[in-house]
Image: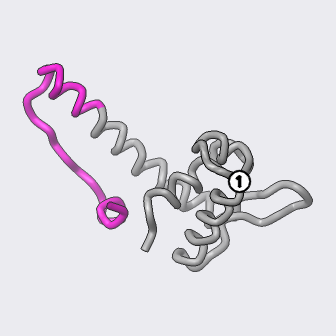
Amino acid sequence: MITLRQVDAFRAVMITGTITGAAEMMSISQPAVTRLIQELERVLGFNLFVRQGRQIVPTVEAQMFFDEVETSYLGLDQFNQSAVNIREHKEGCLRVVTIASVVTMF
């Protein structure tokens, strides 16, 4: 089962371009990021990155998965904004729209 922590690590690597950058972004160790990525790859059944020298390069599958992840994160941002609006009494209604893949992550 995919965990949100695994997806966070994957997203951080995609954004920063490195395991080191992802570790710094998440305030965890490099080995922890590597372990989360490996666990995610095992669950997904495909590689997300390939090594080219000292760099890691996202696979085509990683790019496709990242597009889905970013769509999900946009939804999470909307949740946060809705909560702020409710707290500040700017709106009285919380609407939740999602896709099945997001629901299974929680």
Q: Position of residue 87 (x, y in %)?
A: 17, 25
**For the view shown, which residue lies furthest in the left direction?**
92
Is residue 95 in the magenta section? Answer: yes
Q: Nearer the viewer, residue 53 or 74?
A: 53
Left or right of 55? Residue 59 is left
Q: Position of residue 76 (x, y in %)?
A: 35, 43
**What's the magenta region?**
81-106
Residue at x-position 36% and y-position 37%? 77
Q: Nearer the viewer, residue 33 or 100?
A: 33
- Figure quadrant of the C terminus: bottom left
Q: Nearer the viewer, residue 86 or 24?
A: 24
Q: Quadrant of residue 60?
A: bottom right
Left or right of 2? Residue 103 is left
Q: Position of residue 29 (x, y in %)?
A: 67, 51
Crowdedness near tag 1: few (<14), some (14–19) or many (≥20) residues, C-alpha within 10 Å = some
Q: Examine the rendered structure and indicate whether residue 42 appears above or below residue 61.
A: below
Element type at mark 1: helix
Q: Amino acid at mark 1?
A: Gln
**For the view shown, which residue lies furthest in the right direction?**
53
Is residue 37 in the magenta section? Answer: no
Q: Position of residue 85 (x, y in %)?
A: 20, 25
Q: How many marks?
A: 1
Left or right of 85? Residue 57 is right
Residue at x-position 82% and y-position 64%? 51
Residue at x-position 77% and y-position 66%? 50
Q: Which residue position is annotated with label 1?
A: 30
Residue at x-position 54% and y-position 61%? 65
- Figure quadrant of the N terminus: bottom left
Q: How is the image coloured?
A: one colour
